Amino acid sequence: MPDGISRRAFLAGTGAALAATSLGAFGFGALESAQAAAIRPFKLTGTIETRNTCPYCAVACGVILYAKPAAETRGKRSIMYIDGDPDHPTNRGTLCPKGAALLNFVGSPDRLTVPRYRAPGAKEFKEVSWDWALDRVARNFKEDRDKNLITTNAGGATVNRWITTGFLAASATTNEAAWLTYKVVRGMGVLAFDNQARV
Amino acid sequence: MTNLWTDIRSTDLVIVMGGNAAEAHPCGFKWVTRAKAERGAKLIVVDPRFTRTAAVADYYAPIRPGTDITFLLGLIKYCIDNNKVQWDYVKPYTNAAFVVKAGYSFKDGLFSGYDPAKRIYDRSTWDYEIGPDGYAVVDETLTSPRCVWNLLKEHVAAYTPEMVERICGTPKAKFLHVAAMVGEMSAPDKAMTSMYALGWTQHSYGAQNIRTMAMLQLVLGNIGLRGGGVNALRGHSNIQGLTDLGLMSELIPGYLGMPHDNEKDLQTYLKTRGFKPLRPDQISYWKNYPNFMVSFLKAMWGEAATKDNDYHYDWIPKLDKPMYDMMQAFELMAHGKMNGYVCQGFNPLLSGPNRAKVTTGLSKLKFLVVMDPLDTETANFWQNHGEYNNVDPAEIATEVIQLPTTCFAEDEGSLTNSGRWLQWHWAGGDPPGQAKADAWIMAQIHLRMKALYQKEGGKLPEPILNLDWQYKVPANPTPDELAREMNGKALAPVADPADPTKILVAKGKQLPSFAFLRADGSTACGCWIYSGCYTEAGNMMARRDNTNVGDANVYPKWAFSWPVNRRILYNRASCDLTGKPWDPTRKIIWWNGKLWTGYDVPDMLPTANPEKVMPFIMDAEGTARLWVRGLMVDGPFPTHYEPFEAPVVNVLAPRIRGNPASRVFADDLAEFGDAKEFPIVGTSYRLTEHFHFWTKHDRVNAMLQPEFFVEISEQLAKEKRIANGSWVRVWSRRGSIKAVACVTKRLQPFTIEGRTVHMVGIPLHWGFMGLTHKGFGPNSLTPVVGDANVETPEFKAFLLDIEPTTPPAGFHGA
């Protein structure tokens, strides 16, 4: 359901067939084909529709993402239109001034596309590979954890806490990503672990 | 939300206090206008500003920032004095009749047990009298002076309409108009809904603001009903989900508590979490806590967690202070006690209080990791942006690793909305460049750490090496796999406790709900309250049947609502003691003589006798609480406190500054301003054209609201000789910002204690990155102090001053 079906394309196709039949019956076949040739195809024709929800506030309005197939856009499926989902019980197709402009968020010129590193004292970021960046994160974590993890407190009780590295979790990642984040972060013993609920 | 967005359609009266839904939650607010159009519902707005919500209200009353408790206790007093109480609800369904034990008292703004040196209470006197039968003593006649109802009457006596006017600056006549409208909602067939947001939470007594409304709603008998409830309008699309999942320093998924230093083993930890019923026949559902906790530990460490090793309770880090919230983290950083920090989709440089302290903290880190779809201010905190970020990169030795992530449109999974709906979404496009999903990044970090510990050894490698990781492709756990893990499954056959020969769930199967969780290691479940979201019937969060069953506006077949697909919490309280709906035209569940049934999942055991088993099954009392025992750190009743930075002293308790139970760090205390130096109240808020700090990266929204401004009244403008559209400097003890002044009638000064109190309104959304003009936000000015219970910073009421000025150097704006 979410993927690969274009409801509007399907409806558009059905409508066109009906019109052709009735107009044809009245003998306007040539006129109709001339008119059809002059009309720019509906811009959402042939797009892939995907159900999603707005990432902003917690009303969580339903949205529909329309994308050109990867084959038409240099190998990447790119979203070219976003609209409210008329089937959604809460927003019933409407969107606010933020939701209505979501396409410009997805395609913002400020989207990050490569991992970057800023060395101590440096004036600029430099681009790095994912492997380098992730190894660096893991190495930093391990060094700090090995040095500062507190296994027992002054009274001798097992406490296994790591309080010299903290983690501020997101507010718009999925529950599934959040659960995995919880496992990984708590599994290392981090206590300074928070999300944006407090601000 | 106790209820849900579409349920607002069923209400008779909406009260918006501590929020501005028309501006900040427009598509949810449509249900307010629908209720007005369809049912003749009324809308009351009580707010320091004449907001966009106020513009469509039936009645608007102004209130000075930070004085909501006084207003609400005034409403409760009005209802009691004028017999606007739904007695058939209050008597059986609240703890009004419970008798409080000797020793509890309230005097001069303080409850019994206060330790001024530590700023904490010894809460041992805040409890019920326990009878010889082991149950709490109740006085159904409500005559005992120690019963909760009489203590409440005594507690609210000070909050007269005159006192409301004196503290809140709300004219008495306006307060009484609101009170009369609210009082009508005590009729059994009337329902009021409360909609609030950060305007209530961002105070040093934020949790008590909300509690006071909950108490009012109980007095009116409005909790559990269609069109009723206390409804938090959450700000981010999945802030509810991340909180449910326990991504907070003191939480384990499903609102279980992180253990403390003195809880040495699982048995000790569970001993204080027995939740024995306080009255006969009551359910006290939290008594299942061990099932939730052990199943969580099994989800963390799988086969490594066994009965013999306490399910590796020892691998859960133990707290040595109540919490390690963000303000605590930045306090540690500022004192050089933290080395590393990760910001996953979070921009604390702009969203934390006292930006100067945040910058100091980040500058003392060894490393900062930022995961974000956008280029945030936090990731660039070390860059010089003139007046907007005046730092010297050469002096900042923090290394920064910036990791590009996907956004909603490129990721699959569920988000939990304000109404507790877990809605599944699918990826519609490919991510730009090399951006990666958060789950992939977290898996990579884990696997690389694991490899390092395997190769090199190190301190306590076991919790990392044994983290349950049974994903088909270990480097890339799928949303489907993770959702199944949150829901939980049977690791061994789960038998019926009443008949052990009867197997309810076979080994390896997804659990139908948390009712099947066990404390013997036979089940694993990541987050018990989410159990039921992904069962053997499939992914319930992906359901898309929008049938309006019973025209009850709760859409039970759409997505999944926690817990157990229940749409309205406490819905048992929508019926009287015999199980009949208070309002037959607005029924949601009912007792059919044998069973609870209806349009929603009953918040009750299906066969529970309506006259014996009371509706609030999570509470050991079986009732709701007008008085909360020792469950909140700052008092069993709410009471009036001023913000830490207030224009006047607390008239009810002149010696008390702020919330006496709030944590205050010494450096921050020294940075509080007083009313002599800073006579004007500052408050911060959001605009409909922007979402926090995200949409300034979006061309359309950047054009709609391109430039930072502050709002002031015409009176203040005249006093300070500030012209509309001219530049002003606004400063507090902690910082100074420049903005364009918007002079408006929508802000009006207050008269408090015979003098004029002005206010400056500061919207949130600008920074030094993005497509708008550069600007400041309010948080260069805000104080570092938070709510005593949950440490939400006091962003809504602080002190500042304002004067005309020149544009910032290099400003090329409009």
Image (tube, coloured by chain):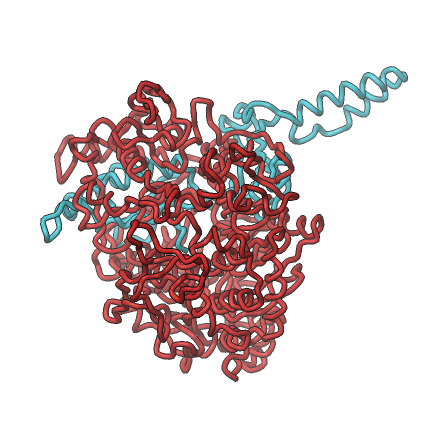
Taking B559 as reference, is B636 left or right?
Answer: left
Could you tell me residue B470's position as x and y percent? 29, 25
In the picture as drawn, the residue positioned furthest to the right comes out as: A26
* Near-viewer residue (A103 or B321): B321
Q: How many marks?
A: 0
Taking B31 as reference, is B100 left or right?
Answer: left
Could you tell me residue B481's position as x and y percent? 38, 27
**Residue B444, visible in the rendered structure:** yes
* Near-viewer residue (B564 or B384): B564
Could you tell me residue B805's position as x and y percent? 50, 76
* Near-viewer residue (B137 or B790): B137
Taking B204 as reference, is B102 left or right?
Answer: left
Q: Residue at x 51, y 43 (%)?
A: B572
Q: Residue at x 47, y 66 (%)?
A: B69
**Figure colour of chain A:** cyan
In the picture as drawn, the residue positioned furthest to the bottom comes out as: B754
From the image, which quarter does the C terminus of chain B lie in?
Answer: bottom right
Residue A143, relative to residue B330: is it above or below? above
**Residue A108, visible in the rendered structure:** no
Residue B394, relative to residue A129: is it above or below? below
Q: Residue at x 36, y 37 (%)?
A: B527
Chain that appears red: B
Could you tell me residue A171's position as x and y percent? 42, 46
